Amino acid sequence: MHFMKHHLITIFLTLLLLGCNSDYTPKPRGYFRIDLPSHEYQQFDTTFPFSFEVPIYATTFPDTSGLAEPYWINVGYPAFRAQLHISYKEIHHNLSQYLEDSRTLVNKHIPKANAITQQEFLNPEAEVYGLTFSIRGTEAASPYQFYLTDSLTRFVRGALYFNIVPNNDSLAPVIDFLRQDIDHMISTFRWKY
């Protein structure tokens, strides 16, 4: 019996030593799988001076921060811990100031950005004109921003933020997904006169 125990221990140690001959390479750290819902939209149409379509999986609520002005709202994406902050301003011969302020807020991300690309948006039938800014970089706090105006009386600015420490490499699928939602919102944006 003692011989059998000794023999089993020897076999076990031999197998253990043979199994350890290969180099061990740890797997790189991974990220959780992100399930993205289907893009489905509903109309945001209230007493606000504008309307647009928002995703059914988003919540729209007034901005209650101390700096908020009338018609400022947030579009929240609870599943992604993200918010699109939307501000509204009336133009009183100060459109150039609003445009410059928008560029300044985008340019604040330059230290963390690898690239900032802009794309023009024109919808003359609805009198909606603007620019979108895609801010690329692993630590950029706001990966997507935009402004819209009718060029005469109204101006809207939006900025997407995540309520987590930015790591836009791992958030890339979510950023692309939300960018599609924001582009849809922009394409369905209408002024109320």
Image (cartoon, rainbow, N blue to C red):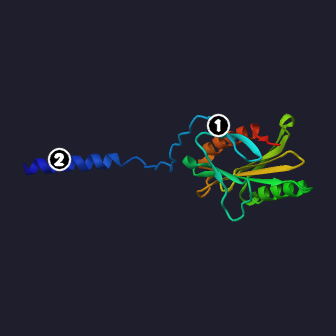
Residue with the most extreme front position:
47
Residue 12: numbered disc: none
Residue 42: numbered disc: 1
Residue with the most extreme bottom position:
66
Identify the residue at horizontal 33%, vertical 46% (top origin): 19
Helix, strand or loop under label 2: helix
Q: Position of residue 35 (x, y in %)?
A: 53, 40
Q: Position of residue 50 (x, y in %)?
A: 76, 44
Point out the frontmost of discs 1 and 2.
1
Quarter occupied by residue 174: top right
Q: Gap between marks 1 and 2, in whole Å?
A: 69 Å
Q: Position of residue 80 (x, y in %)?
A: 57, 48
Identify the residue at horizontal 83%, vertical 45% (top origin): 130
Judge from the rendering whether residue 153 lies leftward or rightward of residue 81; answer left or right: right
Q: Position of residue 74 (x, y in %)?
A: 66, 52
Residue 8: numbered disc: 2
Near mark 1 (Cα within 10 A), the count class, few <14, some 14-19 or many ≥20, is few
